[in-house]
Image: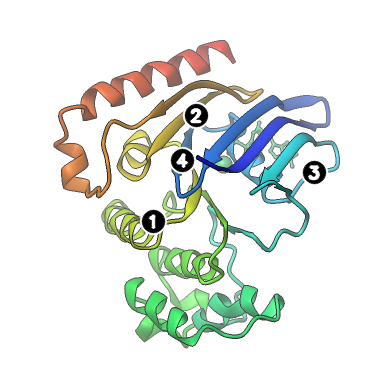
Amino acid sequence: MTQTLCVEDVHVTFKNATIIDGMSLTVDDDEFVSIVGTSGCGKTTFLRALGGLLPLSSRIGRAELHGEPLRTPEPRVAMVFQHFGLFPWKTVEENILYGVRVQHRQEPTERVQRLLDVMHLDDARRKYPRQLSGGMKQRTGIARALVLEPELLLLDEPLSAVDAITREVMQQEVIHLIESEPRTALLVTHDLDEAIIMSDRIVVLGGPPAHVVLDVRSPIDRPRTLESVRSHPDYLTLRKELWSALEAGRAAA
Ligand SMILES: Nc1ncnc2c1ncn2[C@@H]1O[C@H](COP(=O)(O)OP(=O)(O)O)[C@@H](O)[C@H]1O
Ligand SMILES: [Mg+2]
């Protein structure tokens, strides 16, 4: 299989602290990979390095997307942030179209409408972020990324700031979107269940400095629903394996 994303030897140092010390990762085409790790282990820093939001002190040995080096800014990559990252002075629709307009692309009217529908944003399209709940803000963030049809989607704990019920609904919506139009995605989360529910493969990080403790393919195949995953015979075994790896990663840090 082709490797959509190939990152080798990422190093990030802030002041005197080494946050990432030589991390490597490859992701296949259309694979949904979750990176799990405890708070502060360097997950966001790793995604920011990939997304080209690099601090000056960082260095990537090699980062390629479909064989082409990752550049900055990188129009092939779209990122969804933990704290929404919406423009407060723009409406939902304008936020969603932001990347399209910056890249001087033709506005994909049908695609925007489909995303507004799937994400239940149609009634909110002319609202501003301050008028929205956390869930609606993040639906906008996800739509803004997906409208670009990125070769690589980076998701940094996109659901961690929404309430538990909305979170489950949105997990299901995102699974549905990804399964209906396959896309290579890297999700960072500290939530094991979210990782299991959404992913084809799960990478457990220890740290800092961030390092891979475990890299497993999920025994639970697509199509996935919250129900089907939780009632899968391998669910608990996988969860225990991930939990042990998290503990080991924390102990080693
Ligand atoms: N811009 C920065 N300057 C200094 N330290 C930072 C900066 N960004 C992150 N850190 C530190 O790097 C470590 C990893 O942070 P982060 O990547 O945000 O972790 P995670 O996303 O896994 O919770 C933390 O100790 C954090 O304080
Ligand atoms: Mg983070």
Give the quarter of the figure containing the C terminus. top right
Q: Left or right of 166: which side holds 57?
A: right
Q: Earlier in the sequence, mark 3 or mark 1?
A: 3
Residue at numbered disc 2: 38
Q: Earlier in the sequence, mark 1 or mark 4?
A: 4
Q: Position of residue 28 (x, y in %)?
A: 51, 41
Rounded to the nearest angstrom, the CA distance separating label 4 from label 3 is: 24 Å
Seen from the viewer's position, the closer of residues 90 and 80 is 80
Ligand 2 quadrant in view: top right
The answer to whether the residue bearing label 1 lies less than 8 angstroms from the nearest atom of ligand 2 is no
Q: Mark 3, residues whose alpha carbon is within 10 Å: few (<14), some, or many (≥20)?
A: few
Q: Position of residue 169 (x, y in %)?
A: 27, 58
Q: Mark 1, residues whose alpha carbon is within 10 Å: few (<14), some, or many (≥20)?
A: some
Tags 3 and 2 in contact by the CB under 8 Å rule?
Answer: no
The answer to whether the residue bearing label 3 lies less than 8 angstroms from the nearest atom of ligand 1 is yes
Residue 52 drawn above or below residue 229: below
**Mark 4: which amino acid?**
Val
**Mark 1: which amino acid?**
Val
Q: Earlier in the sequence, mark 4 or mark 3?
A: 4
Q: Earlier in the sequence, mark 2 or mark 4?
A: 4
The answer to whether the residue bearing label 4 lies less than 8 angstroms from the nearest atom of ligand 1 is no
Residue at numbered disc 3: 55
